[in-house]
Image (cartoon, rainbow, N blue to C red):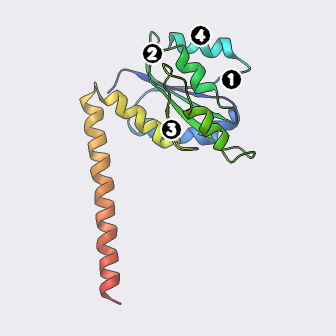
Amino acid sequence: MSWKKVAIIMGSDSDFDVVSAAAKTLKDFSIPFEMHVMSAHRTPVQAAEFSSKAKENGFGVIIAAAGMAAHLAGVLAAHTTLPVIGIPVKSTTFDGMDALLATVQMPKGIPVATVAVNGAANAALLAVQMLALSDENLSNQLIKMKTDMANEVIEKDKKLQNKVAEL
């Protein structure tokens, strides 16, 4: 098991329904995580302090979910050398496009890996892949997951071919 934790930081508690998919995915891989609410705009000092101490506190990756202006991932990335994965969260105003652009458009030197709007499960899988670079067990779990996914598609195709033959 990987000894590094993953931080899941959301800009608002209203983002919990989105980020819970990341938590579930990390649990499926037995990766420890912490989940917190921090705001790039309302608690910038706390966000910067958390991020700047994340590596020494045993974190290997930070996942940041925010909607609208979505500056959280960038603020966290500015204060750490750990990989930061941004989840743009869909809002009612621009359907998440504002959050997507704010998350992905980072200045040189402050990278944020960005997944799809509300793409929390993929954010967690990307975190698993990052941790798997130095953890053979995680790497093997990912290989099994991808093999299982491929086998599911192959089975669906077989069923489809049977339906086509019956036409």
| Nearest the eye: 141 or 134 | 134
Nearer the viewer's eye, disc 4 or disc 2? 2
Asked whether disc 4 touches disc 1, contact meaning CB atoms under 8 Å apart, the reply is no
Within-10-Å neighbours for mark 1: few <14, some 14–19, many 20+: many
Residue 161 placement (x, y as % from top left)? 30, 78
What is the distance, in whole Å, between disc 4 and disc 2 at their CAs? Answer: 13 Å
What's the residue type where badge 3 is placed?
Ala
Give the answer, above or below, for where 144 lies relative to 6: below
What's the residue type where badge 4 is placed?
Glu
Question: Where does label 3 land, which residue?
Answer: 22
The residue drawn where x is 48% and y is 37% is 123
Mark found first going from the N terminus, 2 or 1: 1
| Nearest the eye: 18 or 107 | 107
Mark found first going from the N terminus, 3 or 4: 3
Residue 81's disc is: 2
What's the residue type where badge 2 is placed?
Thr
What element does badge 3 sit on?
helix
Question: Where does label 4 land, which residue?
Answer: 49
What is the distance, in whole Å, between disc 3 and disc 2 at their CAs? Answer: 21 Å
Question: Where does label 1 land, which residue?
Answer: 39
Instruction: Report whether 16 appears left or right of 110.
Output: right
Mark found first going from the N terminus, 3 or 2: 3
Mark found first going from the N terminus, 4 or 1: 1
Choose top left, top right, bottom left or bottom right for residue 37: top right
Residue 70 placement (x, y as % from top left)? 65, 31
Mark found first going from the N terminus, 3 or 1: 3
